[in-house]
Image: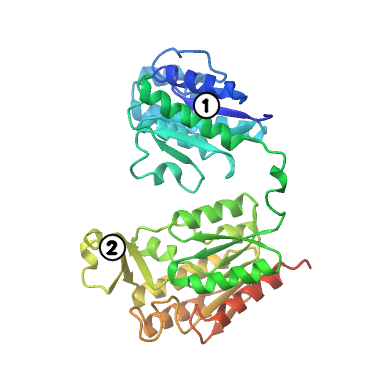
């Protein structure tokens, strides 16, 4: 293989385990680069990149970290440093995969390294916390986490088996095949956002775009989905966006569990790529099971989507603010932009006789958008609800028009 597996971890406390994985990978024909992130003691074997180099890249020297003797500071500095080191290696074109392992600290540092390389580069993290909430470690990147079952503290019959499986998995992901470049057709990629309640619309948009020769990547608008799409936009993979489902903004505004953060809906505009935007699922804020809904929302309108997902109807005031927020973001856009507003409803639940049907809420959203959107942004009004086939046809047609070479 022309590229190498970058092994990231503390060789002072996990050196035996990392040497085992390194030797396994090399026996499979995978070359390695070992990056030491340990700060406590001497490494069990010589790394390719020392912990002092990593620490300096993170803003402190290794001696300073050792003198300070603060675990939290050490983890933060080494996480920053390893991200910078691995990003440099990635820029040099030598990273074929990234491997890490450890407990909470090792997982944090390993994940930082993995987030520094592009989506598509294999990333495997063996972790004691992989059976819990992995979102802080995975984020919007394609990090594969494997639960270690036992603590990573020496080699035994079980840990050897798990680490062997991990090494073989990484080697398999890194394997170059003769037809690798022909696995997919070289089609321009389009990003689209979807929720269950906007599926009919996005499915039809996707089909129309695919018929015109585009490869459509559909992202589930659960916070990480929106972040993943915008990460690919920033990386230059996505050439246009059908941002049908902007519901993550409602969670950001009100405090739901599917927020994509305050920068959502800005990447396409900054990248200058064509975008068609709509108001999909802005009728709802997402929470977990009913008992997890914050007490201050007790008197609000709810819909039990399933046993683990509780939806809360957005209010008139919230819709007014959502309209203002969206307009403010799109007004900063450098890209060709069309906004499609379906006046008949913004989701399967927000239409005549359905649980979240809200004429006043939609009107507040509509008014705020009309009052605040830049005059040169095309605003398309449709009487139908968002899942009517006519709305999907209009979204697809506008995006295809903007995507055509001038």
- Occupied quadrant, residue 247: bottom left
Query: Considering the numbered disc 1 on the image, is that residue within a helix, a strand or a loop?
Result: strand
Which image quarter: residue 260? bottom left
Mark 2 or 1: in front is 2
The quarter of the picture where the C terminus appears is bottom right
Name the image quarter holding residue 355: bottom left
Front residue of this view, candidates 135 and 55? 135
Residue at 52%, 79% in the rendered image: 341
| Residue 336 appears in view | no
Q: Position of residue 256 (x, y in %)?
A: 34, 61
**Relative depth, front residue between 316 and 151:** 151
Note whether residue 54 is visible: yes
Which residue is labeled 1 in the image?
Answer: 7
Q: Vertically, is 238 above or below 194?
A: above
Q: Which residue is mark 2?
A: 307
Give the residue at x 56% y 29%. 85
Q: Is residue 19 positioned above or below 180 on the image?
A: above
Between 2 and 260, which is closer to the camera in this rendering?
2
* Secondary element at tag 2: loop
- Which of 134/326 is in front? 134
What x and y, as percent, mark residue 162? 42, 29
Between disc 2 and disc 1, whose residue precedes?
1
- Quadrant that contains the N terminus: top right
């Amino acid at each position: 293989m022309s590229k190498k597996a970058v092994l990231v971890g503390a060789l002072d406390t996990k050196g035996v385990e990392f040497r085992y994985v390194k030797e396994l990978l090399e026996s499979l024909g995978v070359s390695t680069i070992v990056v030491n992130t340990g700060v406590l003691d001497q490494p069990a074997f010589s790394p390719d990149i020392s912990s002092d180099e990593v620490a300096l890249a993170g803003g402190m020297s290794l001696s300073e970290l050792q003198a300070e003797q603060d675990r939290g500071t050490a983890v933060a500095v080494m996480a920053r440093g390893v991200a910078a080191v691995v990003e440099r290696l990635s820029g040099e074109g030598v990273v074929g995969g990234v491997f890490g392992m450890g407990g909470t600290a090792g997982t944090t540092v390993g994940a930082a390294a993995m987030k520094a390389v592009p989506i598509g580069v294999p990333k495997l993290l063996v972790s004691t916390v992989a059976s819990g909430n992995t979102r802080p470690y995975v984020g919007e990147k394609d990090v594969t986490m494997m639960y270690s079952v036992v603590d990573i503290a020496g080699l035994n019959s079980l840990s050897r088996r798990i680490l062997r499986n991990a090494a073989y998995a990484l080697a398999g992901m890194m394997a170059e095949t003769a037809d690798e470049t022909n696995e997919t057709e070289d089609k321009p990629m389009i990003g689209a956002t979807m929720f269950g309640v906007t599926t009919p619309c996005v499915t039809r948009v996707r089909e129309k775009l695919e018929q015109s020769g585009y490869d459509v990547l559909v992202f589930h608008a659960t916070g990480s989905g929106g972040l993943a799409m915008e990460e690919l936009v920033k990386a230059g993979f996505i050439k246009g966006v059908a941002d049908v489902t902007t519901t993550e903004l409602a969670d950001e505004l009100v405090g739901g569990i599917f927020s994509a953060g305050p920068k959502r809906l800005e990447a396409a505009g900054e990248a200058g790529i064509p975008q068609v935007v709509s108001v999909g699922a802005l009728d709802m804020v997402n929470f977990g099971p009913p008992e997890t809904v914050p007490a201050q929302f007790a008197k609000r309108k709810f819909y039990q989507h399933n046993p683990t997902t509780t939806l809360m109807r957005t209010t008139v005031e919230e819709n007014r603010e959502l309209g203002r927020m969206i307009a403010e973001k799109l007004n900063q856009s450098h890209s060709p932009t069309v906004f499609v507003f379906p006046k008949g409803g913004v989701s399967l639940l927000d239409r005549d006789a359905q649980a979240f049907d809200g004429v006043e809420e939609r009107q507040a959203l509509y008014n705020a958008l009309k009052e605040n959107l830049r005059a040169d942004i095309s605003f398309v009004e449709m009487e139908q609800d968002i899942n009517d086939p006519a709305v999907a046809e209009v979204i697809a047609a506008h995006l295809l028009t903007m995507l055509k070479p001038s």
